[in-house]
Image (cartoon, rainbow, N blue to C red):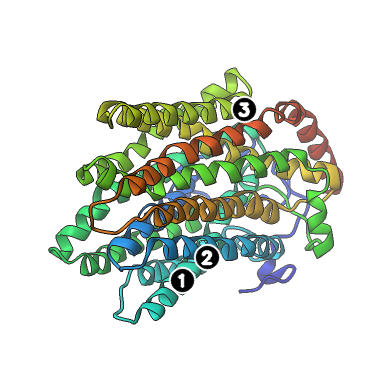
């Protein structure tokens, strides 16, 4: 791995031939790629979707089922699990800027973001498997093993998932096409989550034949192998076509891309709160359906409803052509609040299963917009930073704006409800006290609702910067033409 300037022939900006962007690195004929001046090929779109299918096939296990696995399979106390989640996610969140700086300095014959799919696919798959192994250890060693493997898996996920976001600004300079690519990415993400939710626990039970430890040990490697293969597909087919600077920007200059970048700060604040709410919701969902509703058989269905997010995610390009991206983003968050309120009403009315599932579905439908829009506009904030400061720091801005927010928000969103149910007297595999049941319900309903409400506030200020996008793109195009 060489991250020095112009390594291996380098991704160095240079004049292009007529009609072709400088450093466009066109694909060989017959690969199905076409120049991305207005749109991108379906090979590119589906390969971009494959990159997020690959990530979710493993990370969905981490985000949705690991707390439940730790408490009810590996025998770690809920409060300790909360501490592991928070400490690990915050340690991992701090590595996001480091990864971003590495990506911004990467020079290879494959580009800046794309080679990391190749370099990290194997390590990510290996540690994804190790995280769900259950070696026979003393309690302290068990906690240490869980923390180390969990941290390592999260660090590697940041390393391989951040390029999924940062490569977007290099695939096309067109803001509308970036929304389309983000839509394909969201389809891939939700498909990966759906596959895990529909088949994961079922495979654990079938392969384990009553022994969940053995079931996880046999099931997770299947998903890891598929993840590895799909990352290689993304590596093979994606191409970075937007020109980049010929030499790495000095470290101090890279951080200069944050200066006055208000669109990025809005994305950062809203995304952090969104992930606090979303992860709090899914962290204790298995506990909610098993102990509050007494319907553990519905856990698989409830989580699979995440696929309903495609009802809005698929329509994002259509929505964004008819109204502003800021409005679509805010409406997505408002829909998630509405879903939480309906779930809360169902709990208040004697755990009405119909209302709870209706609210659960509304929240997931709305999440298609609420989750996708920050990823779509992050590339626009990279352009804004370059326009304002002259520094294009796609790696840093996307690593902190996406990976840091996801990990830090997930750490808080995972820790708060686990600490809450521990304090309320939660006991795994037992009849829960009234206090514990109330704590589980609060973690599923009201904690996420408060976080989603907070996430809307910064989005209300995004429209001003969205209206500047045509000017930013025109100025950048003129600037790059002069440099070529």
Q: Nearer the viewer, mark 3 or mark 2?
A: 2
Please report the residue visible at 46 percent of the width from the left and 26 percent of the height from the top: 338
From the viewer's perspective, tell me whether residue 163 is left or right of residue 442.
right
Location of residue 49 by image quarter: top left
Pointer 2 residue: 88
Pick whichever of labels 3 and 1 is earlier in the sequence. 1
Residue 275 makes an appearance in the image: yes
Please report the residue visible at 42 percent of the width from the left and 41 percent of the height from the top: 442
Give the vertical position of 37 relative to 204 (above or below).
Answer: above
Task: State the residue lying farthest toward the front.
Answer: 434
Q: Could you say where residue 463 lies in the image, as x and y percent from the top left? A: 71, 26
Give the vertical position of 93 relative to 360 (above or below).
Answer: below
Q: Could you say where residue 284 lies in the image, as x and y percent from the top left? A: 38, 49
Viewer-side residue, 446 vs 142 = 446
Few, some or many residues within 10 Å of mark 3 (<14, 14–19, 20+): many
**Which circle marks residue 147 in the picture?**
1
Pointer 2 with pointer 1, Cβ within 8 A: yes
Q: Could you say where residue 104 lies in the image, as x and y percent from the top left? A: 70, 60
> Is disc 1 placed on a helix, strand or loop?
helix
> Is disc 2 placed on a helix, strand or loop?
helix
Viewer-side residue, 166 vs 355 = 355
Few, some or many residues within 10 Å of mark 2 (<14, 14–19, 20+): many
Residue 188 makes an appearance in the image: no
Pick whichever of labels 3 and 2 is earlier in the sequence. 2
Viewer-side residue, 436 vs 223 = 436
Q: Quadrant of the N terminus?
A: bottom right
């Amino acid at each position: 791995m060489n991250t020095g300037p112009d390594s291996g022939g380098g991704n160095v900006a240079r004049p292009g031939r007529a009609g072709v962007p400088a450093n466009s690195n066109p694909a060989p004929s017959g690969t199905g790629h076409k120049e991305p001046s207005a749109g991108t090929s379906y090979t590119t779109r589906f390969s971009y979707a494959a990159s997020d299918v690959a990530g979710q096939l493993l990370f969905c296990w981490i985000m949705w089922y690991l707390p439940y696995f730790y408490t009810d399979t590996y025998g770690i106390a809920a409060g300790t699990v909360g501490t592991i989640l928070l400490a690990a996610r915050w340690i991992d969140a701090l590595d996001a800027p480091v990864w971003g700086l590495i990506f911004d300095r990467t020079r290879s014959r494959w580009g800046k973001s794309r080679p990391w799919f190749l370099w990290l696919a194997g390590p990510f798959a290996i540690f994804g498997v190790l995280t769900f192994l259950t070696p026979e250890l003393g309690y302290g060693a068990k906690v240490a093993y869980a923390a180390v493997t969990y941290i390592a898996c999260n660090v590697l996920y940041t390393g391989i998932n951040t390029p999924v976001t940062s490569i977007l600004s290099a695939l096309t300079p067109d803001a509308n096409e970036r929304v389309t690519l983000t839509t394909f990415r969201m389809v891939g993400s939700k498909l990966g989550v759906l596959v895990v939710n529909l088949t994961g626990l079922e495979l654990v039970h079938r392969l384990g034949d009553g022994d969940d430890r053995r079931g996880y040990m046999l099931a997770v490697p299947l998903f890891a192998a598929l993840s590895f293969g799909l990352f290689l597909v993304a590596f093979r087919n994606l191409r970075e076509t937007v020109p980049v600077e010929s030499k790495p920007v000095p470290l101090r200059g890279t951080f200069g891309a944050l200066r006055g970048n208000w669109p990025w700060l809005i994305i950062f604040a809203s995304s952090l709160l969104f992930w606090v709410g979303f992860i709090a919701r899914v962290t204790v969902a298995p506990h909610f359906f098993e102990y509050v509703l007494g319907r553990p058989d519905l856990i698989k269905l409830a989580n699979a409803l995440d696929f309903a997010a495609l009802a809005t995610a698929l329509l994002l390009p259509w929505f964004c052509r008819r109204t502003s991206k800021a409005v679509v983003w805010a409406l997505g968050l408002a829909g998630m609040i509405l879903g939480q309120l309906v779930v809360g009403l169902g709990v208040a009315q004697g755990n009405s299963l119909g209302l709870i599932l209706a609210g659960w579905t509304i929240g997931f439908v709305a999440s298609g917009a609420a989750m996708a829009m920050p990823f779509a506009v992050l590339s626009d904030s990279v352009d804004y930073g370059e326009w304002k400061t002259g520094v294009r720091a796609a790696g840093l801005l996307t690593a902190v704006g996406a990976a840091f927010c996801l990990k830090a928000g997930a750490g808080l969103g995972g820790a708060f409800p686990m600490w809450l149910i521990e304090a309320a007297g939660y006991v795994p595999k037992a009849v829960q006290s009234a206090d514990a049941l109330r704590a589980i319900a609060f973690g599923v309903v009201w904690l996420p609702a408060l976080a989603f409400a907070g996430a809307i506030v910064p989005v209300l200020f995004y429209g001003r910067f969205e209206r500047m996008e045509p000017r930013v793109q025109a100025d950048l195009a003129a600037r790059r033409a002069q440099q070529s």
